[in-house]
């Protein structure tokens, strides 16, 4: 059994990652502070480096659809469903 006084110290040192995060500054799910720390995303057991947005609870990520761009010059994205794991890179 662990001592109750040790638990808050462990939780305080571990950063809390949001359930949903986007790299687009116009999105309501954008958080620059967390993105500066560096976020790692593993989707279906494979680490992904091109994730535009993720949602852990709903189990999806958004990734660019090839080199296609919309009329504003932003990449078109597709939504992939599956198991999503997120961590802070050190």
Image (spheres, rainbow, N blue to C red):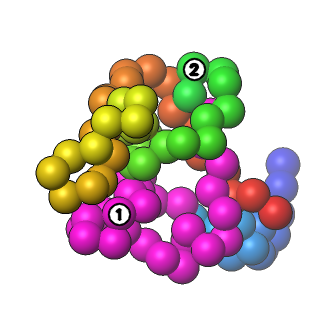
Residue 39: image quadrant is bottom right
Residue at 75% in and 73% down: 13
Placement of 28 over or under 76, stated as above or below? below
Residue identified by numbered label 2: 44
Give 85 or 69, whichever is nearer the viewer. 69
Report helix, strand or loop for mark 2: loop
Residue identified by numbered label 1: 24
Q: Is residue 23 magenta?
A: yes
Report helix, strand or loop for mark 1: loop
Q: Quadrant of the C terminus?
A: bottom right
Q: Few, some or many C-alpha atoms within 10 Å of disc 1 (few <14, some 14-19, many ≥20)?
A: some
Residue 77: image quadrant is top left
- In this view, the residue farthest toward the left is 71
Give 84 or 6, whichever is nearer the viewer. 84
Please indicate, yes or no, whether residue 57 appears anywhere in the rendered image. Answer: no
Residue at 75% in and 58% down: 89
Residue at 25% in and 70% down: 26
Residue 1 image position (x, y, % from top left): 84, 48
Residue at 49% in and 43% down: 51
Q: Earlier in the sequence, mark 1 or mark 2?
A: 1
């Amino acid at each position: 059994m662990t001592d109750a006084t040790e638990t808050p110290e462990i939780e305080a040192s571990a950063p809390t990652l949001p359930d949903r995060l986007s790299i687009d500054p116009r999105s309501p799910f954008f958080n620059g502070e967390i993105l500066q720390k560096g976020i790692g995303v593993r989707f279906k057991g494979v680490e992904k480096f091109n994730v535009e947005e993720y949602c852990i609870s709903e189990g999806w990520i958004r990734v660019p659809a090839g080199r296609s761009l919309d009329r504003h010059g932003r990449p078109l994205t597709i939504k992939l469903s599956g198991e999503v794991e997120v961590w802070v890179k050190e």
